[in-house]
Image (tube, rainbow, N blue to C red):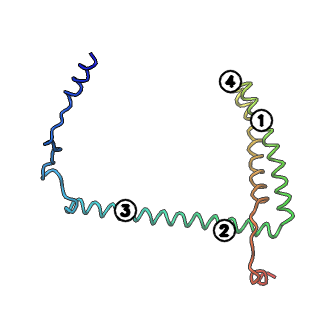
Amino acid sequence: MATQSLDLLYSQIDVCPTFSPPQPEAETVAPLHSPPIHGLLKELVSSQDRQTALLEELVANITNSQRRRILELGMWKLSNPELAEYCKKAAKKLERIQTDLLSSITEEIDTNADVLFDSEFGLNEFVDRYGTKFLQLNSLLQILAQLGNAPDIQIPPQEIQKGH
């Protein structure tokens, strides 16, 4: 019985030495150097070149903006080294406070999810209790962290002499 199924399998495979894939008709395939396709390819390349130039300009603008901001923060830190250190310490403490507040918020949500979902009053009460406090804490933390972690910059001696 097993030999019959093998015979059937092998008898269905056509192994013809003269098999060749069908060739496309000459009029249905346009050569790549034909005028319409060549023009389209030129337009496509031109469009990609414009997109690349715009992206390079965008990256340059963003990079310059970031460099300027880093320089400003570094100059501020250079002018206020003690305050920068206080900001760094305060940010670390506020991070712990933020973590505790976030823990309280998530516990409240877990405990009262049904009330928050079903009752507009309950949701408003929750947002009133935690929303403003959390947003203000995040804003303070962001400012303190940026000022406390400002990069150290080196000012060339000629620039220092100009300022004094």
Which mark, residue 138?
none
The disc, 1 or 2, on the residue closer to the chain's N-terminal end is 2
Question: Disc 2 residue type?
Answer: Arg
User: What amino acid is at disc 1?
Assistant: Ser
Please identify the quadrant where the N terminus is shown.
top left
Quarter of the image with the C terminus in it: bottom right
> Residue 143's image quarter?
bottom right
| First in residue order: circle 4 vs circle 1 | 1
- Say which of marks 4 and 1 sits in front: 1
Q: CA distance from mark 3 to mark 2?
A: 32 Å
Residue shown at the point (83%, 67%) measured from the top left: 80
Q: In front: 41, or 101?
A: 41
| Residue at the extreme front of the image, as rendered | 3
Observer-nearest of 154 and 12: 12
Callout 4: few (<14), some (14-19), or many (20+) C-alpha neighbours within 10 Å? few
Identify the secondary structure beneath mark 3: helix
The local crowd at label 3, few if under 14, some if 14 to 19, many if 20 or more residues have their Cα within 10 Å, is few
Q: CA distance from mark 4 to mark 2?
A: 48 Å
Residue occupying the point 65% across, 67% down: 67
Which residue has dot 3 on it? Answer: 47
Q: Amino acid at mark 3?
A: Ser
Q: Which mark is residue 103?
A: 1
Rendered image quadrant of residue 22: top left
Disc 2: which residue: 68
